[in-house]
Image (cartoon, helix red, strand yellow):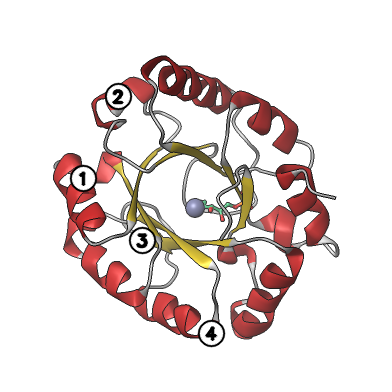
Amino acid sequence: MNSRFPKLAPSLLAADFGRVAEELARVKNSGAEILHLDIMDGHFVPNLTFGPKMIQDIRAISDLSLDVHLMIEAPERSADMYIDAGANYLTFHAEACVHSHRLIERIRARGVKAGLAIVPGTPISTVEPLLDDIDVLLVMTVNPGFGGQTLIPFCVDKIRNACSLRQERGQSFLIECDGGVNDATAGELLAAGTDILVAGSAFFASSQPEALVRIVEGVS
Ligand code: DX5
Ligand code: ZN
């Protein structure tokens, strides 16, 4: 993967799970380099998706960078399974983990990029003490659990807030947004300072998903 940001990360949640290999080929052909993988446990969020075996099987057939987003309670219990399965980025929710700092250190010690996610109702100030230690701050731009929702406008202010904090302090974490990203919202999210834009339905519903990659990554 090249080190240039911003990047678009298609979310497999919106893909056809009966044709995963073909959907992965669509992602690859679009020029996207990061695949976003949503793990839901039916507790932290009402929905349920897939687990480590899916990550392992995708790892075996794809060289995309795997961005695993854990929407699960007690992420410290299964983080190692996702690392073993081949995650390149492992992001968990601050709201689901008391000892966030400990888990960040554990993920990084295993050579994986550590991400901390916050739901719309959690202010940036909650994770401020950890911004020096994380690789990615994932600012949810919808309430987690389902694809196809509309971006919540005040979440863009949180991204601006995170971006100015990063600049003031000379920090280097990436800012990722997740939910409601499409060709109409991408411009505002990029202007706010987002580095990784996750897009599920807008990517997989499109007959020309490479156009969305181009909008975000600015290559022609
Ligand atoms: C929602 C997930 C997202 C989801 C985004 O809880 O975390 O990654 O796939 O879907 P869209 O892009 O359709 O809003
Ligand atoms: Zn996600």
- Horizontal side of residue 7 vs 37, given as left or right: right
CA gap between label 4 and label 2 equals: 37 Å
Q: Amino acid at mark 4?
A: Ile
Percent x, y of residue 150: 65, 39
Does residue 132 show up? yes
- Above or below — where is 105 with respect to 140? below
**Quarter of the image with the N terminus in it:** bottom right
Q: Residues within 10 Å of mark 2 (few under 14, many from 20)?
A: few
Query: Toward which corner of the image does residue 47 lie, by quadrant?
Result: bottom left
Dot 4: what SS?
helix
Question: Where is mark 3, residue-wise?
Answer: 42
N-terminal-most mark, 2 or 1? 1
Q: Amino acid at mark 1?
A: Cys
Q: Nearer the viewer, residue 15 or 8?
A: 8
Dot 3: what SS?
loop
- Above or below — where is 23 with respect to 14? below
The residue at the point 20 percent across, 56 percent down is 109
Query: Toward which corner of the image does residue 171 lie, by quadrant?
Result: top left
N-terminal-most mark, 1 or 4? 4
- Horizontal side of residue 206 vs 166, given as left or right: right
N-terminal-most mark, 4 or 3? 3
Question: Where is mark 4, residue-wise?
Answer: 61
The residue at the point 42 percent across, 14 percent down is 168
Question: Where is mark 2, residue-wise?
Answer: 128
Q: Nearer the viewer, mark 3 or mark 1?
A: 1
Q: Amino acid at mark 2?
A: Glu
- Above or below — where is 5 with respect to 78? above
Percent x, y of residue 19: 65, 84
Question: Where is mark 1, residue-wise?
Answer: 97
N-terminal-most mark, 2 or 3? 3
Q: Residues within 10 Å of mark 1 (few under 14, many from 20)?
A: some
